Amino acid sequence: MHIKRITIQGFKSYKDETTTDPLSPHHNVVVGRNGSGKSNFFAAVRFVLSDAYTSLGREERQALLHEGTGPSTMSAFVEVVFDNSDNRFPTGKEETVVRRTVGLKKDDYSLDRKSSTKAEINSLLESAGFSRSNPYYIVPQGRVTSLTHAKDSERLALLKEVAGTRVYESRRESSLKIIEETERTRGKISEDLALIEERLGELDSEKEELDKYRTLDRERRCLEYAIYSLEQEDVVEQLDEIDIRREQLVVAVNTRQEATSELERQVGTLEPEIRAAKQALEMLSIDREQLASEAEELARARAQIESSVQDLEQDRTLGRDSITELRRTVDGLNRDIRKRETELARATADYEKAFAAETQLREQFEIADQQRKSLLQKQGRSGHFSNKKERD
């Protein structure tokens, strides 16, 4: 594998596209006057193959572009063509073309005329031996002179670095660290596995308990279902009994309603009799009061006549005729008094009968009214439910 051809355009002093002749697979020497672009030629090679031009800023990219008279250069590219006859690059082609294009706002790579990423290019170069950890495949100007003046320890370090032993040691240290970390991780994993196995044992026991619980729970649900079924049957029977009682109560209520209607009718017929009895009682009371007042007047008149008789008996000078007349008058008054007393006694008896009849009628009325209220109250309780389903 060797560099077969290099093409440069717009890079530093190379404004126009410049392509080298086919290079030798052994040694190639670049000669020219000062300012002819020898350093820029090697800078172009390093621009593609080394890490000297990574993470470029805007000003650094501007410095890589050609600056001269005429229109300004907006982008530049460097293309390196490798002879891949020995298949160092795993592309399967005789030539491998690596190009890098830089501009004010871009920094792109391409591989075999196809767009690629910087990571893919670095991986390809690593596979061909261009190791980033051993950058001595490009020896810049002044490096040989500094090597001749270096100390033995510095030359040894440089030889180790060129030979790759330092890379091996650094990788060995990193590998040992990885091994230690792996061992620690393995120990933690072993501990976690022990905890997991212990937890699995606990879970197995819990699973057995859970199975027992599920079995007992199924039995409990079956028993509860059986109990609920029996209770439901009892409730249905009770509801049937309640329906029968309700029908009986409906019949009784209807009977009571008929009785209530009959009592109301009787009360309606008794009320006029009660009013008539009250009126008669009032008339008898008035007659009694009148008779009592007349009896009192007659008693006063009798007392006056008796006093007059006594006066007349004392006064013997009076004639016998006047005495006889007075006695007849007294007898008539006595008869009137007895007559009035008889009428008073009769009126009192009629009054007492009427009062007793009124009391009896009033008691019958109160009893009928209480029965009517009781029946209405029972009828109101039965009216709380409009149908059987709502009552259930």
Image: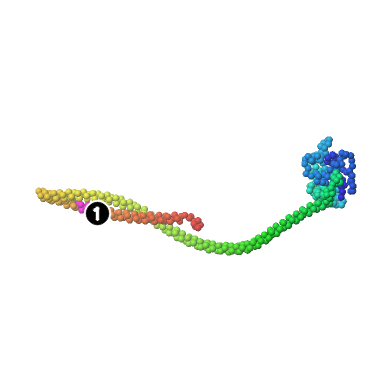
Name the residue: 22% across, 52% down. 340
Residue 138 on the magenta segment: no
* Identity of the residue furthest to the left in this view: 317
Horizontally, residue 164 falls left or right of residue 278, namely: right
Residue 349 on the magenta segment: yes
Name the residue: 38% across, 54% down. 369
Can you say whether 108 is above or below 243 in the image? above
Residue range corresponding to the magenta coloring: 336-350
Tell me residue 203's x, y (percent): 64, 61
**Residue nearest the observer in this picture, 254 or 333:** 333
Main secondary structure type of the part rendered in magenta = helix
Quarter of image, res 376: bottom left
Can you say whether 12 is above or below 210 in the image? above
Tell me residue 239's x, y (percent): 49, 60
Residue flagged by tag 1: what amino acid is it?
Answer: Ala
Q: What colouring does the structure picture have?
A: rainbow
Kindly tell me whether residue 371 is visible in this rendering. yes
**Residue nearest the observer in this picture, 105 or 312:** 105
User: Which residue is tagged 1?
Assistant: 345
Can you say whether 149 is above or below 222 in the image? above
Which element type, helix, strand or loop, lies under badge 1?
A: helix
Tell me residue 145's x, y (percent): 86, 45
**Residue nearest the observer in this picture, 347 or 172:** 172
Tell me residue 46's x, y (percent): 83, 45
Name the residue: 85% across, 44% down. 142
